[in-house]
Every structure is written in structure tokens, then in C-alpha cells.
Image (cartoon, rainbow, N blue to C red):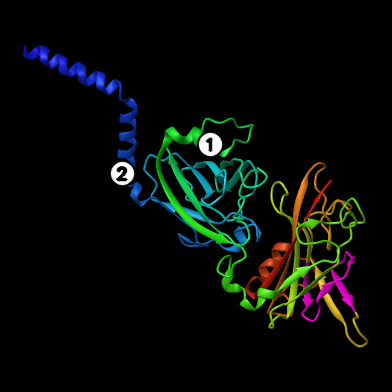
Amino acid sequence: MYRAILLLLLGFIAFYSYGNTELTDKLNLVSERESSGNSNFTLRSPAFSDGGVIPRIYTCDGRNISPPLSWSGAPPRTKSFVLIMEDLDASGEPIINWVVYDITARRDRLEEDIPKQFTVQIVSPGFVEVFRQALNSAGARRVGYSGPCPPSGRVHNYRFTLYALNVERLNLRQDIQPTAEQVENAMRPHVIGRATLRARYGTGSANYGDAPRVNNEASNFVLRSSAFSDGGVIPRIYTCDGRNISPPLSWSGAPPRTKSFVLIMEDLDTPGGTFTHWVVYDIPARRNRLEENIPKQFTIQYIPSPGSLEVFRQARNSFNPVSGFSTAGYSGPCPSPGRSHNYRFTLYALSVERLDLRRDIQPTREQVEDAMSPYIIGETTLRVRYSR
């Protein structure tokens, strides 16, 4: 009698366990997450605090490069990581700003400015680490990082989530760039821990995006052109399809303490990263315009009136489609046929007369930005678009 009851009880337990493997797996997963030290799994950045403002350099209003991240306390059985950054306040479909997967378990950080390419190789003494990036969904779907870019006057919240996985590589094809959804589906059964880091960013507000650097006196700072309106189409004459000359620009309302200006023009829709079309620096504070067709040379000299001389300089652009290489001066819009691109002119007001840059070497945009960063007291933008 007792033997029959025991057999019946064992049979019931076996049947119940077989029919609830999903529940068992979930409980085991939760158990591992709670017992593996996952409570100490932490994601951080030296560039901003959790819940803080992400600096402008990592947004579409800056260089749009990925921020530095580091982590610690991953579960012991971790074999790889996946990082996903998302915009929590996007209207309509969720916006995924960044997806990195197959990050090796030995890594505890992602350096600043990860290349915007499918496969990334990091060479360390004695070995090579390889990880991959999926397509983001911010604007034109492209691989790698795409920084915060909320509508003007809006503040959005962003979340970085680092997932610890119990597999070294996801079961994804190596010859095709996956989407965020494909990465999430492939990793879901293997997640054993996660850590999050939140940040926020807003445009058109003095409280966001490196606001401490910008003086409130710049609220009336305006950049314009007599050749096109803000958000309009840039005329063909200023593109690679025309004469490829620089457009006329003028400005007003600069902060009272302004001692010089820097102008940067960039293509916001270039696949693989930001494309720099024009960088002008050491523009004297007395100037309120750049005339049409600025010569494509390093040093520009003007004699505005008898007895006076104005000198400013131009850095190298990303690429000149006419010459075939990077040159000093302006290089107009030149998107791929059938594509429409957006371009932004940004004029920065600085509190120094000249940047600390060598006069015998043409600098890059990055060198100009690094030199001017501590002295920015105001800025204004002008946007245009062009298609071929």
C-alpha cells in the first residue's frame, strides 16, 4: 500500500516537473541572478553620472561619438556581454541608439569613440579581441553608435543596459549586420545578469548638453544665410554639383565677452560617422559674417579698412570630392545619388582671441574642438538639406 502511494507520488512529481520546464528554467535563472553576485553588477561612465546629463560631445549636437563605459561585478559564469542603448522617450517606435554584442568576458570596458563598423578589433599584448555592432534605429539605420538627438526643446531619457550571457557568441550570421531585434532574440535564453546606466539630454535648453560651458548671454545668438533659410534646401552652386563654393553667412547677438568665433559644418546623415565639410577658426570678434566663396586655403587675410588686417584660419575637412583628399576650407554637400542629407552649420563664440594651435600645420576638426572646448560661451546653428 505504502509502496503504491510512493510510486504514485513520484510519478506525479515527474509529470509536474516535465510539464513546467519553462517555469523551472525561469526560477533557475532568477536564482542564478540573485545568488551569483549579480547585485553587484554595475555599469558606469567616467563622462557622466547615473541619471545625469550626457555631455554634448556624445550627441548629434557634438561629435556624436560613443561615450566611455566600464563595468564590474558580472556573474561568475559570464562568457560574453551585450550592450544596448535606447531612447526611453521616443514617440512611436522605440529608438535603439547602440547595440554591441559578442563582447568578450575578459573585457570590463568600452573605450570612447568605438569605430562605427560591424566588426571591431581591439589589439592587446598577446591577443586580439573581436566584438560586433548591430544596426541602430536612430534616423537612417546604420551600424554602431548614434547619439541622443531629441527634438528641439525636448528632454529625453536614455538607458544603457549591459547584459551578461552564458555563451561566448550569439548564434548570428557573421556576414550580415543584424538588427537590435535579432540580437535580443538570440541572447534572450542566455541572459544571466544585467546592469543599467541612465542619462538624459535635451536640445534648446540651457540646462542640458554641457550647459555649464555656455553663457546665458547667447540666447539671442543667431546664424543665418542670405542664400537659404533655416531648414531649407542649400542651392546647387554651393554643392559638388555646382561650383562647390562656400555660402554667405552672417550672425548677430553674440555674447558680450566674445573674443573669437569658430564655424563647423557637418553632414548629419553620412553612413559610418559624421562628415566634416568646413572648419573655420580664429575668426575675429569684430566680424559678423563670412562672405561667399572663402578661398580654400589655410590662412585667410582680409583688409576691411585702410590700416587694419583681419586673419583667420581653416582646418582640414573630411574629404574633398573634387580633389579626392582632405583639404583646408569648404567642401560642399555631395550625398549619394537618390539620397537626401541634412547638414548643420554651428557657430561657436569663444572667450579667447586665438586657439592654442600650431600655425605651421593645418589642424583637424578634432584638434580644433579640443582646443576650443574650455572657451565656449555661446553657440548657434543653421540647418539645411540637399539631395541629388
Residue ID at (76%, 72%): 358
The stretch drawn in magenta includes residue 115: no
Q: Magenta includes 289?
A: yes
- In the image, taking residue 355 as reference, residue 106 lies left or right, namely left
Question: Which residue occupies the extreme bottom position in the image?
Answer: 307
Residue 260 seen in the current view: yes
Q: How many marks?
A: 2
Q: Amino acid at mark 2?
A: Glu
Q: Position of residue 385 (x, y in %)?
A: 78, 53
Residue sitting at x 54%, y 36% = 181
Instruction: Check residue 274 in the rendering and tell me which mark sits there, or answer none.
Output: none
Name the residue tied to disc 1: 183
In this view of the protein, can residue 98 be seen by the observer?
A: no
Q: Quadrant of the N terminus?
A: top left
Residue hosting label 2: 34
Please identify the quarter of the rendering in which residue 302 is found.
Answer: bottom right
Q: What residue appears at the point 73 percent right and 77 percent down from the top-left corner?
A: 253
* Secondary structure category for the residue under label 1: helix
Characterize the local packing of mark 1: few (<14), some (14-19) or many (20 or more) Cα atoms within 10 angstroms.
many
Q: Secondary structure at mark 2?
A: helix
Tell me: residue 278, above or below residue 212.
Answer: above
Measured as percent of width and height from the top left, residue 370 is found at 66, 67
1 or 2: tag closer to the N-terminus: 2
The image shows residue 312 at horizontal and vertical percentages of 82, 74
The residue lying toward the viewer, choosing from 68 and 135, is 135
Q: Where does the magenta region start and end? A: 280-302
Q: Is residue 207 left or right of residue 262?
A: left
- Residue type of the residue flagged with mark 1: Val
Above-or-below relation of 363 to 3: below
Q: Is residue 42 left or right of residue 95?
A: left
Using residue 67 as the reference point, say whether residue 80 is left or right of it.
left
Work out whether 383 lies above or below 9: below
